Amino acid sequence: MSFAVTMFTNLISRIHDRSQAEDILQAGVESVKQALSCDRVVVYSLQPQHLGKIVAESVAPGFPRTMETTIDDPCFNARYIDSYRQGRISAIDDVQLARITPCHLENLERLAVKANLVVPLRLPDDELYGLLILHQCSAPRVWKQEEITLSAQMSAQIGWGLANAVRWLECQTIQSSVDRQQHYNELLATATQKIHQGSTRAEVLQLATAQAQSSLTTDRAIVYAIAQPNLGKIIAESTLPALSPIVGMTIEDTRFESRYIEQYQQGRVQSIDNIHESGINSSSIDSLVNIAVKANLTVPIIGSQDELFGLLAVHQCFNYRTWQAMEIELLRQIGIQTGLALTKAQFQEEVAAMKSSLKRASMVKESIVTADTQMHQVKGALSNSVQTLEEAKHLLRLLSHEVNALTDKLSSEDINLVRIIAKKLQGNAETASTETSLLQFEIAELETVINSAIKVYKSRRSN
């Protein structure tokens, strides 16, 4: 048994060096075969519906191979599986003399088995994985107690190794999931940063489609804006060069029916792996076929005031695609960020419009102030003109008096000349007086308009 003990030690070492269940099982059957010098050792894995499958085998040359064989033995399963779960060990020295069912004997003879030793293969939590089975095919064999004990011990080690492999696989699965989640988090962070760089709504939508396409590695990404019930217009697109652009296209789609709009407002996500197996109506399929879509993923874009702005969709056009949960969540988050960025861009546009309006108002104010200043200057000049005109009238009256006084002293020709000059001066004075009155009236009207404009400006400024 020293050789057997050595093989037992080697088994433990080999199991420790392996992390895959297939490798552990193969190392186990090879070690058991060498330790107990039997013709065949197999691991019989329990399968649903009373089936068993040979998942590991080490067999001597000249005997049938059983690897991957599926065995349907309802007699065996019904009578013995529960017992093996409890730790039962079966040692048959000669199958022809054993008290076994005919169907069980038939299965053994088909594999050229003349004697066998069956040991439960259990995991550390006593869950029955299957059976470790030793076959003697060349002749019947009397199984010794130490051989049975060694087989049970080696089976326990194989079970321990399997449990470690399961835990290792679980750890690898968890780590893989963590890595994928971290990768998607990085993609989302990048997409979010770039989408929020858009200063206008048009820029935001273009950035969103570009990030959706690159983050999910799809053939196309688009934004549907709801034009009217059952109609959507493609207002932004990022696509592979091999595909024809569809931006600006209006598509009739039942996804824009009121009942679906309400669902999208509440966060509905639609994933279609294969449009021909999705259960959607024929008109929707035709619409998708017309733009070369084979699989798509659609999420809502919620804009300001929690209103549905439209839909962000990614398309697979050259093949079908099974959308993963993390991919769906990634696009959903990109849709949310797009809605937030749209709201921010809309606010920025409104602020820019307000600044432009204030700038125009400031220019109007400056014009009003300038006009008011100039009006006061004109009024001042007009006031001086009126004063000068009054003085001229007074001088004209004095001149008329002097002319009358000189009438007796001047010749008739001189008198006529003086009268012509006086009349001319009087006419000029009357014209100047009339024009001055009109100018005063127009200045008064202009002053009224300017004062009204100032009041309106002040009123709007206070509001």
Image (cartoon, rainbow, N blue to C red):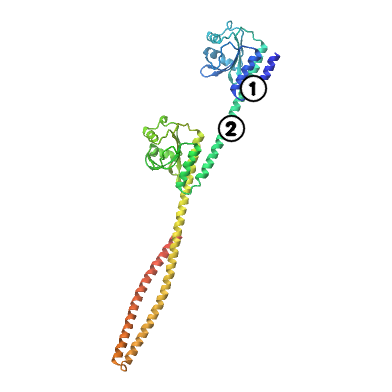
- Give the percent coordinates (x, y) of residue 46: 55, 18
Q: Which residue is mark 1?
A: 15
Looking at this rendering, what residue extends furthest in the top direction?
Answer: 97
Tag 1, which secondary structure? helix
Relative to 181, 440 lies left or right: left
- Residue lying farthest front? 242
Image vertical order of residue 196 relative to residue 130, above or below: below
Instruction: Indicate whether 192 appears above or below 442.
Output: above
Residue 36 in sight in this render: yes
* Left/right of residue 405 with respect to residue 238 in the rendered view: left
Neighbours of disc 1 within 10 Å: few (<14), some (14-19), many (20+): many
- Quadrant of the rendering where the C terminus is positioned: bottom left
Q: Amino acid at mark 2?
A: Gln
Left or right position of 9 against 65 = right
Mark 2 highlights which residue? Answer: 175
Give residue 319's position: percent from left, percent from top: 45, 31
Is residue 312 in view? no
User: Disc 1 versus disc 2: distance between alpha carbons?
Assistant: 23 Å
